[in-house]
């Protein structure tokens, strides 16, 4: 991934499709995804026995169907995500044959991962027989009442965490996620008493982790795995693979990442005397770089010494900047088709009735600026690397309809979600 200095600040195409034509046909703001980029990222992880997409990153069923066709399994964190996975062609149960031939335990196409069962989710996993990754001991007993003899995965909090933001740190005392590592002996007793078999172990400490932190996680997982014993057939390294958003950032060392976890797997195979399936659970890594928000410039104005470019997308469209102070590269598609070589130092904001509706802000809500070609009303601004935690976190705040989504494959765009209408906004409401 090039730094911003090497990125095109003028953009006329996304994956071979005209930005202007996309906006004209589908309106703005608009989410656009590059199918080939998603395939490339899926294939980057081919060394792993199982790649399991954390669909909360980007859950359009066309995206889920695309990764399914690449052999990627799926994680679901809600009844709605289970429904999405089924609609995209996933089955609740593993297909027999291929795993056994490789000497590996069967792979679960869908895994439900959570710290609780709400009542709908418990009904769904019991009815469909979906494997569960349990983040609390209470889940084990609730599952055993409905599915006696089930096999389960334990999500364990190793007592430490890491993330690009404290809000994405999923380990340590400050995190609600997972079963506390010191409680494992008691949890195993409760699982045995409930008649459950612990066959999987999962650890994930946060988003954006590096190899030093991952080595700690691998060591912690090995220790817990030894406590669980020979019933264990699958270990999951979780997700958190970083994606380069800012200038100078780089992709994760995928070879080093796999080597580290493969060594842990081999140690456990030696101890247990049988094969262990090694899973990875990426979310943003598979889809972030594929996604773009196309938005129209609607005003350009000065506030004292600062210049603002205001567009028709807001934090209702892309929430990461207001939530985390996240940085997204930006480029301009001029309406007149002419190059605008002279840059402007501008803040980019949206239409919402909130001072925090700024795409160029730092953590803490401080307004920053970006060097962009001089923008005019009617130009299209493209917010890049927006394919993870983008549309899925969009809202109807200020009664703004959700945008359309388009998937571009081989230069051909396809509408995969229609734009909401005003009638959609109030459907289900009553006076």
Image: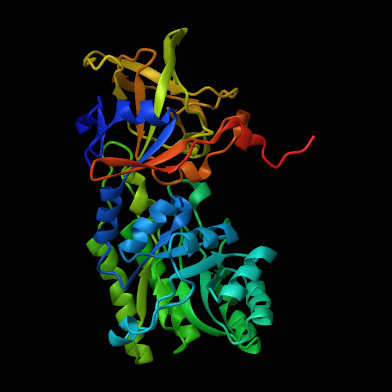
Q: Residue furthest right?
A: 431
Q: Answer left or right for 12 relative to 221.
A: left
On the question of residue 412 being in view, the answer is yes
Q: Say which of 406 and 313 sits in front.
A: 406
Horizontal and vertical percent position of residue 124: 61, 69
Task: Name the spot of residue 56 as percent of width and height, x first.
Answer: 48, 54
| Quarter of the view holding residue 191 | bottom right
Residue 67: horizontal and vertical position, in percent?
35, 59
Q: Position of residue 114 (x, y in %)?
A: 57, 64
Indicate left or right for 355 with 219 as reference: right
Residue 201, above or below 388: below
Q: Quadrant of the C terminus?
A: top right
Color theme of the render: rainbow
Q: Is residue 129 left or right of residue 243?
A: right
Residue 7 left/right relative to 416: left
Q: Where is residue 148, by image quadrant? A: bottom right
The residue furthest bottom is 273
Q: Give the quadrant of the N terminus.
A: top left
């Amino acid at each position: 991934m090039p730094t911003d200095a090497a990125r095109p600040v003028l953009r006329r195409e996304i994956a071979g499709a005209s930005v202007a034509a996309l906006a004209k046909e589908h309106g703005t703001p608009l989410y656009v995804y590059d199918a080939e980029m998603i395939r490339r990222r899926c294939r980057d992880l081919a060394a792993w026995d199982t790649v399991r997409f954390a669909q909360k990153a980007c859950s359009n069923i066309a995206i889920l169907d695309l990764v399914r066709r690449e052999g990627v399994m799926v994680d679901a964190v809600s009844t709605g995500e289970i429904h999405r996975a089924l609609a995209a062609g996933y089955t609740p149960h593993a297909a027999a044959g291929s795993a056994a031939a490789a000497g590996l335990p069967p792979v679960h196409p869908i895994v439900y991962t959570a710290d609780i069962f709400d009542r709908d989710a418990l009904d769904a996993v019991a009815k469909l027989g979906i494997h569960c990754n349990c983040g609390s001991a209470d889940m084990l007993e609730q599952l055993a009442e409905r599915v006696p003899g089930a096999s389960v995965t334990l999500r364990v909090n190793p007592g430490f965490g890491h993330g690009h933001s404290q809000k994405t740190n999923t380990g340590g005392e400050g995190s609600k996620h997972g079963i506390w590592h010191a409680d494992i002996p008691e949890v195993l007793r409760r699982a045995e008493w409930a008649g459950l078999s612990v066959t999987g172990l999962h650890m994930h400490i946060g988003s954006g982790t590096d190899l030093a932190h991952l080595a700690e996680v691998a060591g912690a997982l090995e220790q817990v795995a030894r406590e669980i014993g020979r019933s264990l057939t699958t270990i999951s390294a979780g997700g958190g693979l970083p994606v380069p958003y800012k200038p100078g950032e780089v992709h994760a060392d995928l070879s080093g990442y796999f080597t580290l976890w493969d060594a842990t797997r081999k140690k456990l195979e030696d101890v247990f005397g049988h094969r262990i399936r090694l899973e990875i659970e990426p979310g943003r890594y598979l889809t972030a770089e594929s996604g773009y928000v196309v938005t129209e410039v609607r005003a350009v104005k000065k506030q004292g010494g600062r210049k603002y470019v205001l567009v028709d997308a807001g934090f209702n469209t892309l929430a990461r900047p207001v939530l985390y102070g996240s940085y997204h590269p930006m480029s301009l598609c001029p309406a007149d088709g002419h190059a605008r070589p002279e840059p402007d130092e501008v803040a980019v904001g949206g239409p919402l009735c909130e001072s925090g509706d700024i795409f160029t802000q730092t953590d803490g809500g401080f307004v920053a600026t970006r060097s962009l070609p001089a923008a005019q009303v009617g130009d299209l601004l493209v917010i890049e690397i927006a394919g993870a935690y983008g549309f899925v976190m969009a809202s109807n705040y200020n009664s703004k309809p959700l945008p359309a989504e388009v998937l571009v494959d081989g230069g051909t765009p396809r509408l995969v979600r229609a734009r909401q209408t005003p009638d959609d906004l109030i459907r289900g409401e009553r006076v």
